Every structure is written in C-alpha cells, then in structure tokens.
Amino acid sequence: MSAPRRALLTGAALLAAFGPAACVSPAWDDHDYALKAGKTAEAAASAVQLARTAVRHEDGTTRQYLKVVLTEAADDLGNVNDQFGGVQPPSDASERLRGEVTDLTEKAEDEVHDLLDQVRRDRVRDPAGAVRDLGEIAGRLSAFAERHK
Amino acid sequence: MKKLFAVTLGILTAFGGFVDIGDLVANAVVGSRFGLSLVWVVVVGIVGICLFAEMSGRIAAVSQRPVFDLVRERLGPRAGLVNLGASFFINALTLAAEIGGASLALELATGVNYLLWVPLVALVAWLVMWRVKFETMERIFGLMGLGLVVFLVALWKLGPDWGELAHQLTRPPQDEGLPTYFYYAIALLGGAMTPYEVFFFSSGGVEERWTSKDLVTERANVFVGFPLGGLLSIGIAACAATLFMPVEAVPDSLGQMVLPVAAGLGKVALGVVILGVFAATFGATLETALSSGYSLSQYFGWQWGKYVQPARAARFHVVVLAVTIVATALILTTIDPIMVTEYSLVFSAAALPLTYLPVLMIANDPDYMGDKVNGRFSNALGMVYMVLLLVVAVAAVPLMLATKAGQ
Amino acid sequence: MTEHARTLHARLHLLDRQVASTDEDRLICKVDDLEVRTGDGPFPYVTAILSGPLALGPRIGGVAGWLMAEVDRLFRDDPSGEPYRIAMGRVTEIGSAVRVAGQPRDLALERWLARNVVGRIPGAPRPEHEEDAATEPEALEAQEVAEGRARREDGETLRMSTLLARVVRDDSGNVVGNVVDVRLVQDGPLLDGVQLAFRLAGFVVARRRAGQLFGYERAHRDGHPALVAAVVRRLHGEIRYADWDEVASLGDGEVRLRVPWERLRMLDDL
C-alpha cells in the first residue's frame, strides 16, 4: 500500500470511526517501545521479502509490473519508517534500539529505491546480487523482530 | 461451448463472492499468514452460497420474483428498509473498491497510475450497463475472468510440498492469535456469501427470462459457478502459502498477490492473470452497480432490469448511474480500494441473516413455489446455516474491533 | 363464482407484493397499502391498492417515512396528497405478484425521470408510445383522482395498515392481544361490475406483539423449516381468530370484541 493512499485513508472520515490500525500510538515504556520496534522490523522484513521475490523471478515479469511492485515495496518501507520515526523513544536504551531498526529499514529502503531506479531505466542489472543483498537485510530484520516479540 | 455460455451467469456472480478485489488480496493474505488452515471456511462458504443461490434462483425461475422482492414481502417495509439501507451502503462501498480494483489491474498492465484509469473504467462500466445486453455482458466478463485459472496451473508449476500443504489444512500456525484467525474466517465467509451475489443471481435469472423449465440451467449455474470461484480462491491461497509463507512475506496489494503466477509461469501467464483480474473486478463492478439498482427498485416495486428499454425503467437506470458516480468520486479521493472492501466485507457479514431468512421462508412457500418447494435436506442445511450466519453476524463487528481488522 | 369464496390474509398474501400489469408484463409498484371502505353495507371491504411514497411513508413512519413523502411531493404536480391508487376491480390475479389489467400510468417520479433524465441521455431508445404517454396520463390521472374523491365522499375509508398491530380488547375492556393479520374473503359487493370485493372477514389476534407471522400460524404445513416455524409461533404466544361477528367496533384505533378471549376460536381449528 502506498504512502499517500494510506495517509489519506487514515484521514478519511468514513472509516475514521473504526480506527484504522495503521495509526501508531505513543510508547509508554521501554518494553512497549521494543514491541513496536519488533513490529516495525517485521513489517519491513515482509516488504523486503516481497521485493526480493519479485526480483528473484524477474525474468517472469514485465517492466511495468516490476515497477509497480517495487514502488509498492518502497512506499511500504518509507511508510514503516515514517510511522516508527513518529514514536518518541522513552529512554536511552530505546534510543539505541531505534538506531538499530532504522539503520536496517533505511538500508532496505535505499536498496529498493536503487532497484527501482534501475528498472525505470532498463532492467535490474544484477538480479542475483540484489536477491542476495535483500535476503541478507530481510534476514537481519526478521532476526531483530524475533528478538523483540 | 453452448453449455459453457449457459453457466456464465453463475461464474460472473461467483467472481463477486470469491475473487473480487477484496477477496483476491484477502485470499493471498490468508494463504501467506495461515497457510491452508482456513480452507474449510471457503468450503463452508461454497456450500452456503450454493444452497441459498440455488433457492433464490429457483424462486426467480418459478415465480419471477428476485430476492429483494422476497425481503420486502416477508420482512415488511421497516425491517426491509433496514436491510435495504445496509445492503445499499455495502454495495456502494464495494462498487467503489471494484472500480479501483479494475483500475489497479490496468496499472499493472500498463504502469500508468490507477487513478488515471478510474474515470475511464467507471464510464465503460456504465456504458456496458446502459447499452450492452445482459447475456452478452455476462458472457464476455464471465469467460475472460476464467484467466484466473492460471493460479491453479502456477501452483502446480511452483511445485509445492503437497504433504506440507495437506498438513496445513488442519493446523493453524502457532504464532497467530485465535481472534485474528476467526476474524479472517468471518471475513472469508462474509465474502463468500455476500448478499449482492443472490441479488444479482436471482435478478439475472429474471433478466434471462428463466421459467420452471430452466431449473436445470439454474442448478448448473449454481453448481459450476460457485465451486469454481471457491476453487480459484483456494488456489490463490495455496500459491501464497507456497511462495510467501516460507519467507514470512504478507502481500497487501494486487500487484504482489499475482507474483506467484509470474514466478511459476512467466510473462505470458502474468498477462493472462492480469486480464483475469481485470475481468473479475470489472465483472464485480457490474455486479455491485446493478445490484444497487436491483435492490432499491425491487424494494419500492419499480420497473427494473436491462430486459426493458431504459426509458421504461427510468428510476432503475438513474439509481445505477448515480451510484456509479458516487462510487467513482469515493475512489478518486485516493482511499485504498482494498481497505474499503475489508471493512465492507465485515459489515456485510453482519447483514447476512436479514437477506437469507426471507429466501429460506419463500423457498418453502407453496403459494410461490407450487411443487418446487425445498426438500428436507435443503431445509435442514438451511437451518444450520441460519444459525451459523446469526453467530457470524453477532461476532463480526466485535472481532473486527478486537483484532484491529486482523492486524 | 365457485362455491368456496377465495380466502386471503391481507398481510401475508397482499401487502408488500409486487404489482405487475397483465397486458404488457410491466412492473408497476408494490402493494404499499390497501384502501378499506367501512360504513357501506354490513362488512368493510377492500376497494383499492394504494402505492407510492404517500402510502408507504406512513407505514414506515419516523424521519424515513416523512422524507419519502416529501421527496415525492417535489415530483408531483397534483397537490391532493392522495397516494397512487389502483382500483381492486382491475386486479386479475393474486399470486407471487398481483396482476392488474390495462395499462396503469407510471408513478410520478418515474415519469419525471424518464422525461428529464433518462430521455436526455444519448442512446436511450424512445418508448414506442411516447406521444400518447405525454398526453394520456393527465386525463387518466384526473379521472382517477375524481374517482377516488367520489368514493371517499360516499363512504368512510381507512387504510389496511392502520388495522394491523391494533390493540384488541375483550368484552369487558381488557387488553387481550394484537392484530397480526386480517382475513379477507372474496364474497363482498360487486366491483366495477366485474368481480366480487374482498370483504374483511375477521382478525388474527396474537397474545404477544411480535411482528409478522409469515404464515407459520397455519400449523402442520409440510416442508416449513420446523425451527423457524417454532420460533415464530413461540414469540407470538397463543393465536386466535376473531370473526367479524365477534367484533363490536373498530373505534379509537382499537378492536373491541363482543366476547371474552376464551370464546375465540384457536387458529388451528379453522
């Protein structure tokens, strides 16, 4: 889901009453913050894995299609970053946690954006390498999510 | 070929229940999160919709009375109006989502942003409803939608561990909470049995001028169309369970959910599946827009239908046009179509008993049915489903709130 | 005439059914209400089908009903405030739909939309009788309005819906139940010289007020989903039938009986 869509959705009066789950509430303590960090990593891992799957089967896709799927992944990652960035870490320990997560998610976002640029110009230059890199990032995100359940 | 044409009404109707925009993505989400552990719900849904669609189609064939006539007649003007309000609201929301869905399919094919396609899709949909004959309409989009069958081929090509898939049938994954599991169960059941399917199916039977002699055709439509729709929806879930579940990826868009086809079969199949997705969502667009007109006209007793000249059914055509415009405006606000259906699915689950109870009652009324009333088996099963639908109706909204819509 | 006059229940068999024309297979309206003439002969009888927002609105009541009637007023030129009316003499068949003879004109909203909206969209084929349709309805309308007025002048009328859900009191004035349906028998006065009117034969009275009976009071009918029937019957408590002979008056929005509750026949005995 792309960022503007979700942002506008959140504001949509029609559904406002039902409290779309995309909203992020403030963190009360370290534990709560860690849980949120874990959730963020999990969502980011899912987006990275989707992009990785698409690139892995790159030869079975058209350029237009790959563009749409990578754009969605990039938007999802940006969205995840924005939401988590909006939560105030309650302590120094949480501050460190935040660094750990955002390092990973931003790296993922950059990687996907890079791939998207390649697709916009032509095709993915080194699909195997991209699959490897994305796989590694996704693995680290998942491991982080696993630690902070 | 002629036989295939005869069942396109059932196929087109079933798209709205099993593989419209909301269900396409919901099936992929369910497959990637729960594996095949919710397949039993789809099976329950197929049996339920077959049961009630068969009754409503039989009533339409024997007495020429479509479902909303029955709702008004048995529930009376007030409860009928409540049902009308709820159904109409759900229809309009779903219509908006389907227009968005058909536009998203065009975005996948062309890379041009879906919002640019929305007005065009809406205009073409309206033109089809305004000018194209009912049979032509259902044949074109019913048959095109069969492109979704490539999901089943893709599943086979992806070469899943069949033993593992079979194992998932009875084991929900441990890391998902029970409320979330049941939330998705209700969303799937609500999707499979959405009321607009029987509005459309029974009205379509009247549009096609079915009589008591066409009961064989009617049953063929039911027992080919809905199980086929259900099979496609299981195929989509199985593809997602094979490709996405092992890497813990959860698809949340149309583009992502067709990825298994690209992965398994390549570019041509991807093109076919996008065409299928377009046809299914566009078919569902027609289904929901016409159902809005059908339900409102039938409640008030207006002349409706495409079998008469538009000027002879002025109120019906004005309703269809108006609801299409409103839905288009709604989707142009950039509200996410898939999210819209997730909510409307759950609300429609809450409205199910109000639609299916009158159908069950009239299917037993010899004044309407003569000797074509329900048999014991239909009635026994019908009662079981009424109880089930009541439970679902009561549980739907609380579960949605408790699980934050399945997060 | 057959020796056994046809018996119907107003709510179960007539109200809320589709009205269609016999001649050209056209859907016209719903039976939103029925006009009942009282004070003309020994029995009240049904004189017309009433339809449109002005008949349905009062039945729904509340804001929704009011809104419906007001919207309708916008589209009609006739300020009489009378609902759309089809004389019972034109009814040819009562089944899953009520069929009427002739070509009844369309309701106000349909005519307005056909003329001002749908007729202007390119690609709408004109209806064949468009020219007639433009002139004839006014004459027809005037005739029907006049007819309705004449009828109202020579006898009191009331609407069937106002009889349903009335409180029923027994001979000593105690509340004993509510009207859940009205039984009609087709042996009333001759209508328009073609067929006999449905006269009001009596009331189906339930102890508890729980909406409609859906025909489940007629026990032991085969095939009914037994559970639904049981639930509906249970909700209503005891159900009895008050014949017109046992009714003292219809005054004050109530039904007054001449006899005590126990003297009424059980519905199953009918």
Image: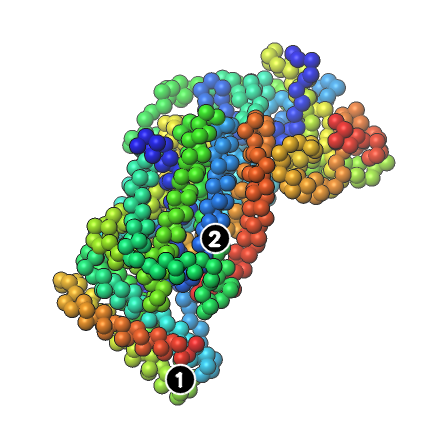
User: How far across and down, in percent of the image, does residue B338 sit?
Assistant: 37, 55
Q: Mark 2 touching mark 1, by CB under 8 A?
A: no
Vertical arrangement, residue B209 with respect to residue B387, above or below: above
Q: Quadrant for the N terminus of chain B, please.
A: top left
B398 relative position to B303: left or right = right
User: Residue A103 occupies which quadrant of the picture?
Assistant: bottom left
Q: Which residue is mark 2?
A: B41
> The residue marked by circle 2 belongs to what chain?
B
- Decide which of B352, B50 is in the foreground and name it: B50
In the rendered image, the residue lying farthest to the right is C172
**Residue B293: x percent and y percent?**
43, 38
**Labels 2 and 1 share a subunit:** no
Report whether residue C240 is seen.
yes
The correct choice, above or below, for B381 with respect to B264 in the image is: above
- For mark 2, does the 10 Å Cα neighbourhood hold few (<14), some (14 to 19), or many (20 or more) residues? some
Residue B348 disc label: none
Instruction: Please tell me which residue lies in front, C22 or B110.
Output: B110
Left or right, C132 with reference to A135: right
Mark 1 residue type = Ser
Residue highlighted by disc 1: A94
Res. B334 in view: no
Residue kind at label 2, given as amino acid type: Val
Q: Chain of mark 1?
A: A
Where C141 sits versus B251, above or below? above
Left or right: C190 as drawn, with respect to A113: right
Disc 1: CA contacts within 10 A as few (<14), some (14-19) or many (>=20): some
Q: Position of residue B239 (x, y in %)?
A: 34, 57
Which quadrant of the structure image shows residue B196? Answer: top left
Which numbered disc, 2 or 1, marks the residue closer to the eye?
Answer: 2
Q: Residue at x 66, y 31 (%)?
A: C221
